[in-house]
Image (cartoon, rainbow, N blue to C red):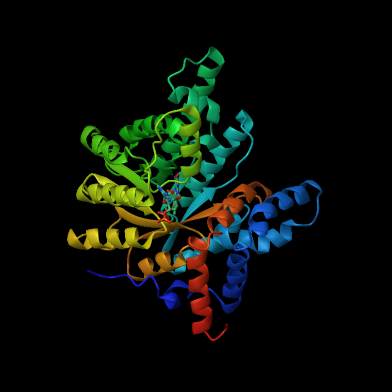
Amino acid sequence: MPKIDFNNTTVAFAHKTNNDLKKAWWLFNSFKYPFIVNTGPKLADIAFSLHLPIKGIIKQTVFAQFCGGENIQECNAAIRNLNQSHIGTILDYSVEGEENETVFDATCNEIIATIEMAAGNAAIPFSVFKTTGIGRFYLLAKVNAHKALNALEADEFNRVKSRFEKICQAAFDSNVRLFVDAEETWIQTTIDDLTYGMMRKYNHTNAIIYNTIQCYRKDRVAHVESVIKNMDCKLGFKLVRGAYMEKERERARNTGYPSPIQETKEGTDAEFNEVMTLCVNHIDKVSICAGTHNEESSQLLVDLMETRGIAANDERLYFAQLLGMSDHISYNLANAGYRVAKYVPYGPVKAVLPYLSRRAKENSSVKGQVGRELRLITEELTRRGKK
Ligand SMILES: Cc1cc2nc3c(=O)[nH]c(=O)nc-3n(C[C@H](O)[C@H](O)[C@H](O)COP(=O)(O)OP(=O)(O)OC[C@H]3O[C@@H](n4cnc5c(N)ncnc54)[C@H](O)[C@@H]3O)c2cc1C
């Protein structure tokens, strides 16, 4: 089996200058301090509302690490840099704005602009969107719970469906593969239904529309099995572990239903590996993207491909990570000839603060990502004689 050396920091950071690496080291090191992670985003919010000149500092530090730019054009440098290392870009409009029709229409247009940018551009292999970017959370939850909608709500839901369809139609017309991100379980059935409807319509010859499968859910192996069995078209799945674990457990506890989430990390890991194996076993019908920063899962996909004689550069199998994280996975896989892409979040600095705050929190546990990112960056600086 080809073993990927995820500890090869020479490959992982070849695209980074000494200065870039030192900046990244300071940033990840700062995430060790709870004050910075917990209070920083609140202070940034206050500073913005007082019109203090804080944007430049954020843009050169945490924003530069995790985001491509404030708009699509500003992402060109990130797209070029990634492409030089044979890594694709997935432009992710990460603005978490107000829930109103004007914002939903604007977001819909912005997502279509990312699809137009990706059309015919090998450096941008996928587009992506979140359903809550084009429709109200409360409305999606009401549909999910099979509650009757009043006339105004029914009209509103028709507008959500029409935006959803417009985005999928644009992806189909431009031959751009499109991920629909997964969200909370109490709106996810609505998202699944909309997405599978679009798959039936647009995935006749190729997987254009991809649903996202959150493997921290206890029911996803059965779900994927059933979709494979019952849907008569090509399927696309982005496989992830899932980002809303605490929120899911808390709601289940407070509302009094059994938690839909695996009880342990090992349970989630096993579900992820099982879903991935199931998909690879149906590769003639199913295309996948393993959206993960987990080295074992990434190696497992490499092993599954090898065992089944699937070429490293097969278009139906992708690996994906987030910009600014897990370069040791992305760059070492791409260097070995596998298909890799990174989410490149973008949007005005103030509007992407919630996204940046989540990245800082995720990287703040010494046991978790931060330990690993900091260790690898330190190793590479030492190897270059710069530490
Ligand atoms: C390209 C990409 C796209 C993504 N898209 C989405 C998306 O559309 N929707 C979404 O929800 N998330 C998405 N994510 C985030 C993803 O779900 C994970 O939260 C994140 O990637 C961490 O999981 P991991 O596989 O990278 O690594 P790991 O560090 O191995 O796993 C951490 C994850 O394991 C699970 N976990 C941790 N502790 C426990 C426990 N005690 N019990 C049970 N499970 C546990 C949680 O899901 C946690 O996030 C995406 C991630 C990437 C890289």
User: Going 38% across and 45% down the picture, which residue do you hit?
Assistant: 175
Q: Position of residue 350 (x, y in %)?
A: 68, 49
* Identity of the residue furthest to the left in this view: 308
Q: Nearer the viewer, residue 319 or 159?
A: 319
User: Going 31% across and 33% down the picture, which residue do you hit?
Assistant: 200
Res. 196 image quadrant: top left
Q: Position of residue 325 (x, y in %)?
A: 49, 62
Residue 46 is left or right of residue 353, and the answer is right
Whether residue 86 is visible, yes or no, is no
Whether residue 77 is visible, yes or no, is yes
Res. 305 image quadrant: bottom left
Residue 387 is left or right of residue 145, and the answer is right
Q: Quadrant of the N terminus?
A: bottom left
* Identity of the residue furthest to the top in this view: 151
Count the marks.
0
User: Going 31% across and 63% down the picture, which residue do you hit?
Assistant: 299
Q: In the figure, 6 relative to 188: above or below?
A: below
Q: In the figure, 136 relative to 179: above or below?
A: above
Q: Position of residue 103 (x, y in %)?
A: 62, 34
Residue 365 is left or right of residue 228, and the answer is right
Q: Position of residue 23 (x, y in %)?
A: 62, 71
User: Going 71% across and 62% down the picture, which residue do you hit?
Assistant: 57
Q: Quadrant of the C terminus?
A: bottom right
